[in-house]
Image (cartoon, rainbow, N blue to C red):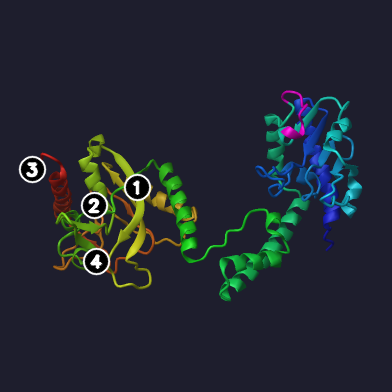
């Protein structure tokens, strides 16, 4: 089966661009299109320039990506004209005029002075310009980067031509080669910098030639990037479901967790990081988020608003024996819904969890709990208890928080009593904190 090369695909690519551009120009009543390749800005108080990135509209027409100052002129029915910038420069070698096979489909004229460019479109009628404003100082009002023209061209660019798809395939092959080299460097114990150099060498590209700046991060550096992605994803998904972000203190009174979780649970007896501060107050690094959220809700009078959905994220702390999937500091997402009756909130949280998974949080472990028929774990006396809970609360846990015992079922009378116990426990702690209030 014959597979056409890039040169053959390029000819059809140009015809496709011409058809699209003809329609866009006709819709705006324009007779010609002029595209500037762009030029790198100069460093402040220096004679050097920043790295150059070509205007993507220019690059779509001709594969000239490393020579700033070029200009493309297109008139419907004619071959594209490229004014190839070749300055008369004492310090720098000017770029060579290209002679590859693709050049037979366009006309190329060397241009020493960009100021000469305007003579090539004078007399072409109504001209549309795309590029930096300083490149076209005499452009008529509304002719430079016309939003309607750009919208039409951008819409068409979403459908890639066979030439563009082949370019993408070849770029992916280069990228795969670079990633294999980066993996080998990592396994050899190379530094982040050395890994970057190996990647560029395998791709045979300079850093400024890469389409995007590489991110090479090990250990704590990669952890920062990972959590930034998780946090951004969480904000987007929770906002879509009407959850407001809520922040609670990392340190709370120890009594808050004892009363809400239970005095005789493993969390309180063995796993909490608790201290006595200089004022002889008993404080604890939060082992979970629900108790702190409910306390904050009560102390700020937010539950008077009847229905409320909030979420928070951040580090939690449990003094567990370090092992796979269990860490003494871990990150948790927690979502709480107050005042919702019926199964609708349960269905919504299932959809929320689905969307988090589809958004890329596939490595996270999800567990959902609430005041309902399902419980997690048992306390020292054999009675079931909740690790997270308030009436109609959905708790979403991420990053390896596990319950080792199977779910238990609580009969309705005990459920009501437990709900009241949790509410009273948290309320008692909050009442103690409020000034001028006694228990």
- The residue identified by callout 4 is 271
Question: Which badge, 1 or 3, is on the more N-terminal residue?
Answer: 1
- Viewer-nearest residue: 226 or 110: 110
120 in relation to 196, above or below: above
- Where disc 2 sits, the SS reads helix
- Where disc 3 sits, the SS reads loop
Residue pushed farthest left?
439
As measured in the structure, the alpha-carbon distance from the residue carrying label 2 to the one carrying label 4 is 16 Å
Question: Residue sitting at 72 percent across and 37 percent down?
Answer: 153
- Single out the mark in the foreground, 2 or 4: 4
Location of residue 389 in the rendering, given as x and y in whole percent from the top left corner: 24, 53
Q: Looking at the magenta stretch, what is its main secondary structure?
A: loop
Instruction: For the N terminus, give its image quadrant.
Output: bottom right
Question: Which badge, 2 or 3, is on the more N-terminal residue?
Answer: 2
- Single out the mark in the foreground, 1 or 4: 4
As measured in the structure, the alpha-carbon distance from the residue carrying label 2 to the one carrying label 3 is 21 Å
Q: Residues within 10 Å of mark 3 (few under 14, many from 20)?
A: few
- Where disc 4 sits, the SS reads helix
Question: Residue sitting at 72 percent across and 45 percent down?
Answer: 47
Residue 291: give its label: 2
- Single out the mark in the foreground, 1 or 3: 3
- The residue identified by callout 1 is 311
Indicate whether residue 140 is drawn in magenta. yes
- The residue identified by callout 3 is 438
- Where disc 1 sits, the SS reads strand
* Magenta stretch bounds: 134-142
- Viewer-nearest residue: 288 or 309: 288
């Amino acid at each position: 089966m014959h597979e056409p090369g890039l040169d053959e695909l390029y000819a059809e690519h140009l015809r496709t661009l011409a058809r699209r551009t003809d329609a866009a120009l006709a819709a705006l009543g324009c007779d010609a299109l002029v595209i500037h390749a762009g030029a790198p800005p100069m460093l402040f108080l220096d004679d050097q320039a920043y790295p150059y990135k070509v205007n993507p509209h220019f690059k779509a027409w001709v594969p000239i990506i490393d020579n700033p100052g070029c200009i493309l002129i297109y008139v419907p029915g004619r071959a594209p004209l490229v004014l190839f910038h070749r300055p008369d420069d004492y310090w720098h070698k000017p770029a060579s005029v290209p002679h590859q096979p693709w050049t037979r489909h366009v006309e190329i004229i060397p241009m020493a002075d960009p100021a000469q460019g305007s003579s090539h479109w004078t007399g072409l009628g109504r001209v549309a310009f795309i590029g930096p404003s300083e490149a076209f100082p005499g452009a008529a009002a509304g002719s430079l980067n016309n939003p309607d023209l750009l919208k039409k061209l951008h819409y068409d660019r979403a459908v890639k031509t066979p030439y563009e798809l082949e370019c993408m395939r070849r770029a992916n092959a280069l990228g795969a080669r670079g990633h294999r080299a980066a993996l080998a460097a990592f396994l050899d114990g190379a530094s982040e910098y050395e890994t970057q150099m190996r990647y560029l060498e395998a791709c045979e590209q300079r850093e400024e030639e890469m389409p995007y700046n590489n991110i090479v991060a090990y250990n704590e550096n990669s952890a920062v990037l990972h959590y930034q992605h998780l946090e951004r994803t969480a904000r987007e998904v929770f906002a879509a479901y009407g959850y407001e972000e809520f922040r609670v203190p990392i340190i709370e009174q120890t009594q808050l967790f004892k009363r809400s979780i239970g005095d005789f649970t493993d969390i309180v007896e063995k796993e909490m990081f608790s201290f006595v501060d200089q004022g002889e107050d008993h404080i604890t690094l939060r082992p979970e988020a629900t108790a702190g959220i409910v306390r904050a809700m009560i102390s700020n009078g937010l539950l008077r608003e009847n229905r409320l959905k909030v979420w928070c994220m951040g580090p939690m702390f449990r003094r567990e024996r370090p092992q796979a999937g269990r860490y003494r500091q871990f990150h948790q997402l927690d979502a709480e819904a107050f005042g919702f009756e019926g199964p609708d909130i349960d269905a919504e949280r299932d959809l929320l969890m689905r969307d988090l998974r589809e958004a890329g949080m596939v490595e996270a472990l999800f567990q959902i709990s609430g005041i309902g028929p399902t419980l997690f774990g048992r306390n020292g006396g054999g009675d079931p208890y909740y690790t997270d809970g308030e009436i109609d609360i959905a708790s979403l846990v991420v990053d390896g928080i596990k319950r080792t015992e199977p779910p238990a079922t609580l009969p309705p009378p005990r459920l009501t009593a437990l709900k009241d116990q949790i509410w009273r426990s948290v309320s008692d702690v909050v009442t103690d904190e409020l000034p001028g209030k006694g228990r």
